[in-house]
Image (cartoon, rainbow, N blue to C red):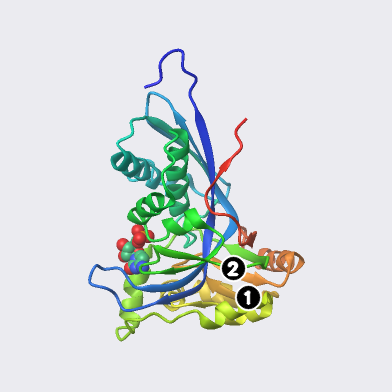
Amino acid sequence: MVTRHEVPRSVSVRAAAKINLHLGVGAVREDGFHPLDTVYQAISLYDDITLTSVGVASLGLQCADYIDPADVPLGADNIGFRALERVRARTGSPGVEKLEILKSIPVAGGMAGGSADAAATLLAYDRLHDLALPDEVLLELAAELGSDVPFSLVGGTARGRGRGELVQPLDDSGTWWWVAVPSDVGLSTPEVYRHFDMLFPNALTEPTGPDSLLIALAGGEPLQLARTLYNDLQAPAIDLRPELGTLIDRGESEGALRGIVSGSGPTCIFLCDSLGGAHAVVAGLRGAGHDVVLIANGPVAGAHLLEHP
Ligand code: C5P
């Protein structure tokens, strides 16, 4: 509890959106999750969260103009709140905080926006209360909150296995230019996975690995990387939302090297040969009636502290 003479302390943390350059999905496990062999990349679309120690818990939300705030849960089911609950339970630390989220990562878009908030909140809590939790503990807490949350802490480009929570950083010295087109209406991740099970009842237990993509990443050539992008959730996402297929074709005809669905969708991402190439694709897609078309580059850092005035 903050006393009258204490100045409330604040910590701000930034966490990035993720895309999957490779998403191999195996047959559903007994626990309901799917085994993954994936390559994540953090790209330059961010959520910033600020945690302030005050006497009353509250949640504030500000969204980029292309995000509908009504799509973000504001109650106890907000993943930032859930992160606070978990880390408090684990560490036994006291504290009541105000959580403010400044959101630019599309919601329910296949870009791990919720996971970014969870990762950022864990880190902010650790720093706000000077806990200095070891990385392993933060990663464990992250995995309890969601399959993508450990990657949101780590960032960069990384391989994910298990259900996606076992993250191993990869060398990636390239700067890759992406165009991202979010959708007005999100897609439910469990629904896309269920649709995968329906479309591929004979999926192998072992997910497809990213061998050729890893070679392309090391080579640094956008065209080579474009050829090796891979997503097993693309077919189910397009089956649920056929307009995503049309969007991908359109982006490629406007000059993108390759378009794919991001994770479980519905955001589609387009790899471009340069920043100039990305601007040309943006212009083409806007001309085709897509109002929200974003440029991002990757890889960028995982969750990290922002300077505070
Ligand atoms: O782990 P996360 O909370 O992000 O998962 C949300 C849902 O997505 C899970 O409940 C499950 O239905 C599906 N999922 C899956 N296999 C994974 C990751 C997620 O089936 N590897």
Residue situated furthest top in the rendering: 5
Task: Residue under label 2, please give it.
Answer: 171
Snapshot quadrant of residue 177 = bottom right
Residue 224 spot, x, y in % from top left: 65, 81
Task: Dividing the image into four quarters, tell me where ligand 1 lies.
Answer: bottom left
Indicate which disc residue 2 carries.
none
Indicate which disc residue 218 carries.
1
Q: Above or below — where is 258 with respect to 189?
A: below
Label 1 packing within 10 angstroms: few (<14), some (14-19), many (20+): some
Are the residues flagged by discs 1 and 2 in contact, CB closer than 8 Å? yes
Say which of 88 and 75 sits in front. Answer: 88
Snapshot quadrant of residue 193 = bottom left
Type of the residue with mark 2: Asp
| Left or right: 229 in relation to 78 | right
Label 2 packing within 10 angstroms: few (<14), some (14-19), many (20+): few
Type of the residue with mark 1: Ala
Residue 48 spot, x, y in % from top left: 54, 44
Tell me the SS state at disc 2.
loop
Q: Is the CB–ligand 1 distance for label 1 below 8 Å? A: no
